[in-house]
């Protein structure tokens, strides 16, 4: 199940996110979205966790916490709609 993490500080790393979310369960992937031109973080990331129960716990525990000076928003990612 995919999780969207928004409002990340530009200096937040994938390693920090991996550590934060792995405390709540098994991670399949952790992808910080980067700007192709500047190489800097766009301020959001996708986390994939295989177990729905762990996803719910992670979302409840981490939504609204302060990370690197920003109050992050954590929710289930919506499926991308093809145009």
Image (tube, grey):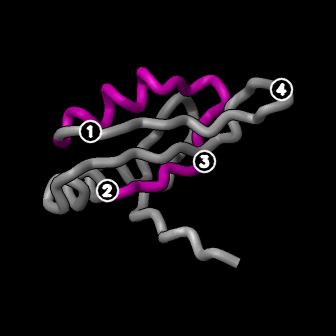
Circles 1 and 2: CB atoms closer than 8 Å:
no
Task: State how far apart marks 4 and 1 are (Cα).
Answer: 28 Å
Indicate the position of residue 11 as horizontal and vertical percent values: 63, 23
Looking at the image, is mark 4 or mark 1 earlier in the sequence? Answer: 1
**SS state under label 1:** loop
Identify whether 20 is placed above or below 80. Answer: above
Q: Which residue is mark 1?
A: 27
Q: Residue at x 24, y 56 (%)?
A: 55
Q: Residue at x 53, y 28 (%)?
A: 68
**SS state under label 3:** loop
Task: State how far apart marks 2 and 3 are (Cα).
Answer: 14 Å
Q: Which residues are magenta?
A: 1-25
Q: Foreground mark, 4 or 2?
A: 4
Q: Residue at x 32, y 32 (%)?
A: 20
Q: Quadrant of the C terminus?
A: bottom right
Q: Which mark is residue 7?
A: 3
* Callout 2 crowding tier (Cα within 10 Å): few <14, some 14–19, many ≥20: some
Q: Nearer the viewer, residue 65 or 56?
A: 56
Q: Which mark is residue 59?
A: 2
**SS state under label 2:** helix
Indicate the position of residue 2 as horizontal and vertical percent values: 38, 56
Q: Foreground mark, 1 or 3?
A: 1
Which quarter of the figure has residue 70?
top right
Task: State how far apart marks 1 and 3 are (Cα).
Answer: 20 Å
* Callout 4 crowding tier (Cα within 10 Å): few <14, some 14–19, many ≥20: few
Looking at the image, is mark 1 or mark 3 earlier in the sequence? Answer: 3
Q: Which mark is residue 18?
A: none
Indicate the position of residue 66 as horizontal and vertical percent values: 46, 39
Q: Which residue is mark 4?
A: 38
Task: State how far apart marks 1 and 2 are (Cα).
Answer: 13 Å
């Amino acid at each position: 199940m995919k999780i969207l993490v928004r409002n990340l500080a530009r200096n937040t790393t994938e390693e920090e996110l991996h550590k934060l979310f792995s405390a709540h369960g098994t991670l399949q992937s952790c992808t910080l979205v980067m700007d192709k031109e500047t190489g800097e973080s766009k301020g959001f990331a996708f986390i994939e966790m295989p177990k729905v129960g762990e996803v719910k716990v992670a979302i409840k525990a981490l939504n609204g916490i302060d990370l690197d000076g920003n109050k992050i928003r954590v929710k289930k990612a919506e499926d991308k709609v093809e145009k």
